Image (tube, coloured by chain):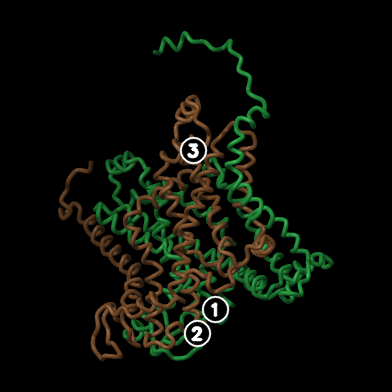
Amino acid sequence: MAHNNDNMNFDHVVVNKPSVGQRMFKYRWFYFMFLPVAIILAIFYYWPMLGVRYAWSTYKLKQITLRTGPDYSIGWGNFERLMTSDPFHSAFKNTIILSFFNLVLATVCTVVIALLINEINHAWGKKIVQTVLYLPHFLSWVVAASIFMLILSAGTDATGADTSNTGFINAILLSVGIIDKPKDFLTESSSWRAVWYIMNRWKETGWGTIIYLAALSSISPDLYEAAEIDGANRLKQTWYITLPSLMNTILVVFILNLAKIMNIFESVFVLYNSLVYDVSDVIQTYTYRVGIVGNDYGYSTAIGLFKSVISLILVSASDIISKKIRGYGIV
Amino acid sequence: MKKKFNLFHPQYAARSWFVLFNSIFFILLMVIMIVPIIKIFADSMVNQTVYGLNLLPRGLDPETDQIVWFNTIAYKRILTDPQLYHPFLISVYTTLMTTFLGLLISTLGAYVLIQRDMPGVKLFGYMLLFTMIFNGGLIPTFLVMKKVGLLDSLWAVMIPTSMNVYNLVLMRSFFEGIPASLFEAAEIDGCTPLGIFWRIVLPLSKAALASIGLFFAVAAWSEYFHYVIYIKSSDKYNFQYKLRDLFQDKQDASEGTKINVNTLKSAAVIVSIIPFLFIYPFCQKYFMTGVTMGAVKE
């Protein structure tokens, strides 16, 4: 076979690449196949991008029948308004605090648990642990928040009326004697954030380990054998081999999530309430309340655009860093 | 292969302690993860006013004053009250539709994107990726939905969930794994592009279809926020929305019955996760395929 190939010399054959028109004709059916995607992209993704112009307008829905269109006479007024708005400052601050601490907690918890899962030698035990830890990821935020509201319940409903339905956590704390009357964790500013962090960790930590476990399984066993011969114990092997090998993955996951820090929304939306806006209100929930509930389209578009621009900068920065670390970007 | 060793030999004492503590740690961790769900399950089958620390589905029935195991009164309520089972049917319908539409859109899109010689294919790819980093935002999208008349229609919920750029890109990387020689051979045999798609691409990507289909199904089932923005009529709400309504105490669904409101809430939580709990043990490997694939390609 090999020498047969050597005899075949196609150098003298000139292949003309078909012209664009010919290629377009050849692929004509593919354009039809792309049509559904193209239409959805155009209508639901690119058309709304034109709508960012409302950010420079006053555009309010007065009543269902008495509608006013956008009025562009205010210039940068919406942006000036949001720069001096207290609720916006609070929402911006909360977004950064919640996302950032959640990201740090996520990185630490996920890496530690991934390392420990990796140390489980029992195949079945490992599978059971993984199955259980991955499970909460698939529950919706509504379900997760509902579960937390039930187990944290202080025995009153949203109107404050007594229902005597003291939740699991309050029951434990009461029986141990840490507290003497049920505490409503979700309506107190001092505890709301802690609950939110715990809910996020409960739901996502297990699932987050997958990527680290994949990275751990690709570390060459030769490294560990060499270390063992040199007399390094397991702790030293973890410190000098496992962690440095994981560093790249940790950084990349951290950067990917850093690019998304402005996007927290649904997890907050299902857990917060008007009593804890000061610690829980984030940009997206604020946009929702101003725009959809308050029908102030112009101002809320401005808030949304502000958020999108910061996100865009973060994603671009992450892309550049990612290219530096591993040679290719994130998008 | 590791050499066989006796864990309790003094040489491995440190390792043995570690294994012991690691096992205890994971048993505790699993308990912490799963106890909230078990507690909700237990409470959903206890129709009494005080739950406390009870973790078993048994409790005093206030009507008969007897201890009852597996009291299903709240579940019966959910199955018979149209206000509660209708949203469940909406959830089933939108999940099936979104999974089908999502797979249709992502397979067609991905199949086009792997045609390297097609003029404009790179532009299509960039246009898709750009939507991942920038979008018009909540209000402009809402106003477009309003202009095209999809407000208060289930399509407003199903279309955005079906069009998932991440899943499309994932599908493309699955398709890229199909040997190009297969396409060439089929083309020489006179197979049309659609024929190749139907007879070669789809049958060879069953694992991808299963795992991405599951992603769509889970996303569609969990859908909540799109209902909040776009849906106004109460007969179009899905089960997640109804569940949230119950918890916001907007209306007391247990009114006029002898069911404790928290028993009903717990039962509603369980009903909304049961379809998933049934398929999860059998489909876990498909969920995993998608993620590791995405992780490698990312």
Label 2 vs 1, first from the N-terminus:
2
Chain depicted in brown = B
Q: Position of residue B1 (x, y in %)?
A: 23, 41
SS label for mark 1: loop
Dot 3: few (<14), some (14–19), or many (≥20) neighbours within 10 Å? some
Three-letter amino acid code at the position of disc 2: Ala
Which chain appears green?
A
Marks 2/1 same chain = yes
Which residue occupies the foreground of this view, B102 or A97?
B102
Mark 2 and 1 residues: CB-CB less than 8 Å, in contact?
yes
Give the SS element for disc 2.
Answer: loop
The vertical placement of B51 against A321, above or below, is: below
Label 3: which secondary element: helix
- Residue B279 position within the rendered picture, expressed as x and y whole percent measured from the top left: 35, 58
Q: Which residue is mark 1?
A: A273
Q: Tell me the chain of label 3.
A: B
Q: Chain of mark 2?
A: A
Disc 3 target residue: B197
The answer to whether residue B194 is above or below residue B210 is above
Q: Is residue A262 at all visible to an observer of this figure? A: yes
In the image, what residue occupies the spot 35% across and 53% down? B283
